[in-house]
């Protein structure tokens, strides 16, 4: 049984202790054959999953086979109260910049709503992880999904690879222009796995993928290649691997699907119960917290008329996670082969909770044909089984509810099911108690100060002649090294009117156009007992904390824009 710790108030950890720590670790730990010339500053590998729910990996309660991620947890630490920003674009903006997404200009998605906080592209009031770490002397590489810029979409023929219309207005905020030394991946936020739209190498579109292409494999292979190349030098490196799995469409390799084909006939209600039970045994959730009721968007499993089709959808989703874990395995193997594993900090997390969206044929970013002219069946049609390149489906609210066990709601919302992410961190050279479960609160804004502390770097006040906003997060290094650290300041969320603030044990949260709810997160993190009526003074107190933050970062009343909505996904 892994050990657990809770937060305590203490003086802040000093980054000046790190060189002494590295030297002490080097003296005390056996070398295991590692190179004596390993850099004093660790390499950093940041692995981001897409639309992965809190309970979707084995070490957080899942039945899905994730041995490589589980190995990271056994050799590192797991956080139980780590948060993202509830949706893909805002999370990536915060993760990359150490700011709240509104401050970076991506408070919503990639459309331009006129207000500074909602321009739909990362701005120049921020500095990216790649820019900051590059200045500190790191090699910086990215593979996978970017989703931080406007897109120029001219219509379905372009999405279907029928023409080569440029999918960009400019490339000023592409990865290479925001600090990464190399990039392989997709610029848009979603695409099929066998022939993704906007596939790019550095600054140039990849016109046709190689035969046998599968995007999850390609991201992992490219990541492993970058590690092998970087390990040949003495320069520390930062690798950002942003997988699209398990985001819809449900497309997976047949051999992966076959492993899960008979597993989900029990349905989502029973799956939630089983996962919750495992989470309690693992120490991931508190047994005092009730399993949240089935979401209102999901019907009882026994009422479903197409259970075989529904179970198959979850089997494909599980297969996508299985393949993601195989990709993590390739990355870890590359680190082992390069003798770089001991002094590399590896992090794994998700950009938001499980996704309840129901795919619609008229969505602008979905292809309707393959490159060779085959029709794609778009939509959650029970007459069509998900999995191959010629289908485009999602797994819906019932399974998303199970992915987010034991929490409420989904991606997009500020309830725990939308914003809680697994976070696994491994650093063999320094973590003193492998297998520990950490109950400290954290947020993706904490990655910037964490990485700069690891790099002995400085967060700039100015970059490329632009003044830079002060970073919002705090370093996670004291927590993972079992050192004293300060109490966590408030954490905030706002996305399309869904909003929340977490201060200590208290969380104030609301859906768009709905009243505030208040929860005691120590006694009821599954948000099943609303205390707003009983604790009106606490509601007023937290409302004011939220109001001051919202005013500071530029939150606007959703969805009213300052100027007419500009949607740069439609050509002139």
Image (cartoon, grey):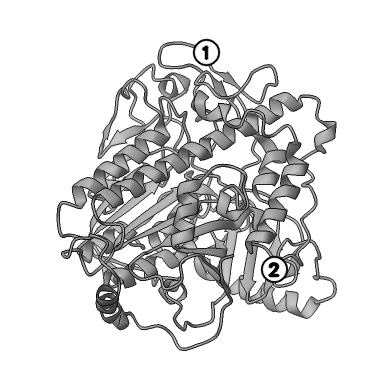
Q: Nearer the viewer, residue 348 or 114?
A: 348
Q: Residue at x 56, y 54 (%)?
A: 59
Q: Residue at x 64, y 38 (%)?
A: 357
Q: Is residue 60 left or right of residue 324?
A: right
| Marker disc for residue 375 | 1
Label 2's element?
strand
Q: Is residue 314 left or right of residue 99?
A: right
Q: Is residue 380 left or right of residue 387?
A: right
Find residue 285 and report its horizontal and vertical position in percent: 67, 63
Q: Residue at x 64, y 46 (%)?
A: 403
List the residue tagged with mark 2: 508
Give neighbour class at mark 1: few <14, some 14-19, many 20+ (Cα, 10 Å). Answer: some
Q: Quadrant of residue 372?
A: top left
Find residue 411 and report its horizontal and vertical position in percent: 61, 48
Q: Nearer the viewer, residue 499 or 243?
A: 243
Is there any visible trace of residue 403 in the rendered image? yes
Q: Residue furthest bottom?
A: 11
Is there any visible trace of residue 246 in the rendered image? no
Label 1's element?
loop
Q: Residue at x 35, y 83 (%)?
A: 14
> How far apart are the two marked residues, 2 and 1, measured between alpha carbons?
47 Å
Q: Quadrant of the N terminus?
A: bottom right
Q: Earlier in the sequence, mark 2 or mark 1?
A: 1
Q: Nearer the viewer, residue 143 or 492?
A: 143
Q: Quadrant of the C terminus?
A: top left
Q: Quadrant of residue 521?
A: bottom right
* 323 relative to 543, above or below: above
Find residue 447 and report its horizontal and vertical position in percent: 41, 64
């Amino acid at each position: 049984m892994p050990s657990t710790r809770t937060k305590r108030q203490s003086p802040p950890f000093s980054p000046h202790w790190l060189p002494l720590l590295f030297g002490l670790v080097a003296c005390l730990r056996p070398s295991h054959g590692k190179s004596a010339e390993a850099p004093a500053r660790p390499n950093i590998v940041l692995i981001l999953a897409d639309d992965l729910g809190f309970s979707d990996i084995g070490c957080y309660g899942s039945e899905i086979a994730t041995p490589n991620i589980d190995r990271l947890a056994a050799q590192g630490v797991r956080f139980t109260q780590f948060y993202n920003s509830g949706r893909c674009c805002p999370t990536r903006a915060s993760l990359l910049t150490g700011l709240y997404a509104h401050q970076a200009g991506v408070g919503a998605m990639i459309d331009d709503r006129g207000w500074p906080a909602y321009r739909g592209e990362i701005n120049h009031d921020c500095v990216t992880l790649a820019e900051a770490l590059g200045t500190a002397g790191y090699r910086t590489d990215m593979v996978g999904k970017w989703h931080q810029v406007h897109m120029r979409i001219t219509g379905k023929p372009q999405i279907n690879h029928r023409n080569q219309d440029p999918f960009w207005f400019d490339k000023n905020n592409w990865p290479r222009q925001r600090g990464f030394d190399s990039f392989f991946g997709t610029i848009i936020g979603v695409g099929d796995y066998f022939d993704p739209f906007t596939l790019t190498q550095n600054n140039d579109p990849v016109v046709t993928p190689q035969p046998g292409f599968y995007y999850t494999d390609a991201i992992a292979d490219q990541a492993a290649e970058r590690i092998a190349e970087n390990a040949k030098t003495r320069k520390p490196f930062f690798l950002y691997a942003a997988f699209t799995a398990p985001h819809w469409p449900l497309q997976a390799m047949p051999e992966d699907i076959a492993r899960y084909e008979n597993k989900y006939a029990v349905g989502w209600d029973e799956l939630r119960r089983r996962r919750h039970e495992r989470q309690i045994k693992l120490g991931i959730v508190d047994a005092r917290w009730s399993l949240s009721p089935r979401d209102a968007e999901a019907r009882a499993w026994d009422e479903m008329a197409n259970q075989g089709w529904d179970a198959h959808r979850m089997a494909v989703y599980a297969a996508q996670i299985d393949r993601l874990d195989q990709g993590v395995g390739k990355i870890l193997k590359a680190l082992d082969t390069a003798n770089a594993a001991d002094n590399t900090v590896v992090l794994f997390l998700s950009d938001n909770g499980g996704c309840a969206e129901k795919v619609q044929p008229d969505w602008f970013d979905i292809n309707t044909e393959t490159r060779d002219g085959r029709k794609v069946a778009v939509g959650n049609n029970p007459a069509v089984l998900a999995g191959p390149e010629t289908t485009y489906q999602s797994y819906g609210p019932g399974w998303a509810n199970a992915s987010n066990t034991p929490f409420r709601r989904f991606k997009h919302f500020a309830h725990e099911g939308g914003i809680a992410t697994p976070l696994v961190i491994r650093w063999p050279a320094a973590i003193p108690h492998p297998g520990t479960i950490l109950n400290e609160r954290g947020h993706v804004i904490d990655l910037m100060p964490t990485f700069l502390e690891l790099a002995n770097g400085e967060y700039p006040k100015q970059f490329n002649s632009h003044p830079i906003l002060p970073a919002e997060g705090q370093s996670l290094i004291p927590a993972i090294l079992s050192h004293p650290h300060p109490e966590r300041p408030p954490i905030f969320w706002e996305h399309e009117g869904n909003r929340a603030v977490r201060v200590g044990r208290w969380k104030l949260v609301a859906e768009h156009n709905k009243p505030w709810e208040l929860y005691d997160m120590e006694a009821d993190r599954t948000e099943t007992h609303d205390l707003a009526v009983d604790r009106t003074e606490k509601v007023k107190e937290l409302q004011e904390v939220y109001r001051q933050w919202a005013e500071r970062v530029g939150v606007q009343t959703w969805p009213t824009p300052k100027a007419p909505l500009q949607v740069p996904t439609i050509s002139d």
